[in-house]
Amino acid sequence: MIVSGVDEESITASTPTTLVQVLADAKAEVIATSLTASALVLGCDSMLEFQGEALGKPVHALDALERWRQLRGNSGVLHTGHCLIDTSADAGRAGRAVRGVASTEVRFADVSDREIADYVATGEPLAVAGGFTIDGLGGWYVESVAGDHHNVVGVSLPLLRKLIIELGYQLADVISTDPEA
């Protein structure tokens, strides 16, 4: 994984879905233009939409505490923008980009103030979009998801598969299906 260094705070958009797509595009483009070898470059960005507001990473622990007090017992929609760029030398594919946004509803448990404080004290909510992870400690506090679970982890595998095919590849062309590899 290569970190793009895109200044996420400087980018704005009118809707959460547009914002995550613009950020994913910017991240993928920065990396794709820096490579000298052929590759498929995937840029992603996630954001939680809650009560019409786009929530990125909490700014500090107090922000995370307040956010979790609002989220508990409620639902939000996690949007992840994906941009896949082909940097291969193949004239038909070189520089071609495909994109899409996956959205998944996340229902949060009605957690106690103590659970919120303990979770925020781990530091995990400060490092992730929406202030939670489903594949880390935050998974204890996610009651259910409606839609693509992988999207909440950070990359929608069903959407990525469609983007790979849209570029003219088959899934087996880009991933190893050999259990020994």
Image (cartoon, rainbow, N blue to C red):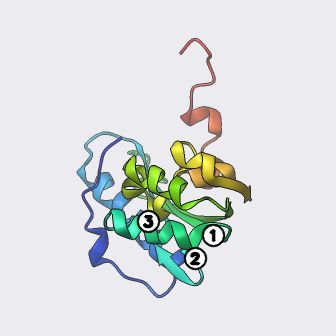
Give 178 or 90, whichever is nearer the viewer: 178
| Spatial CA span between label 1 and label 2 | 7 Å
Q: Residues within 10 Å of mark 1 (few under 14, many from 20)?
A: many
- Residue located 31% across and 44% down the image: 2
Residue 173 falls left or right of residue 66: right
Type of residue at label 3? Leu
Q: Are marks 1 and 2 in contact (CB under 8 Å)?
A: yes
Type of residue at label 2? Phe
Q: Is residue 78 above or below residue 171?
A: below
Kindly state the secondary structure of the residue where label 2 is placed: strand
Residue 145 falls left or right of residue 92: right
Residue extending furthest toward the front:
114
Q: Residues within 10 Å of mark 3 (few under 14, many from 20)?
A: many
Give 77 or 166, whichever is nearer the viewer: 77
Kindly state the secondary structure of the residue where label 1 is placed: strand
- Residue located 48% across and 70% down the image: 67
Q: Position of residue 74 (x, y in %)?
A: 67, 70
Q: Position of residue 121 (x, y in %)?
A: 38, 50
Q: Which residue is mark 2?
A: 50
Type of residue at label 1? Val
Q: Say which quarter of the image contains residue 95.
A: bottom left
Sequence-first tag of 1 and 2: 2
Tag of residue 65: 3
- Residue located 49% across and 54% down the image: 92
- Residue located 64% across and 40% down the image: 170
Q: Say which quarter of the image contains residue 163.
A: bottom right
Q: Quadrant of the N terminus?
A: top left
Q: Are marks 3 and 2 in contact (CB under 8 Å)?
A: no
Tag of residue 51: none
Q: Which residue is mark 1?
A: 77
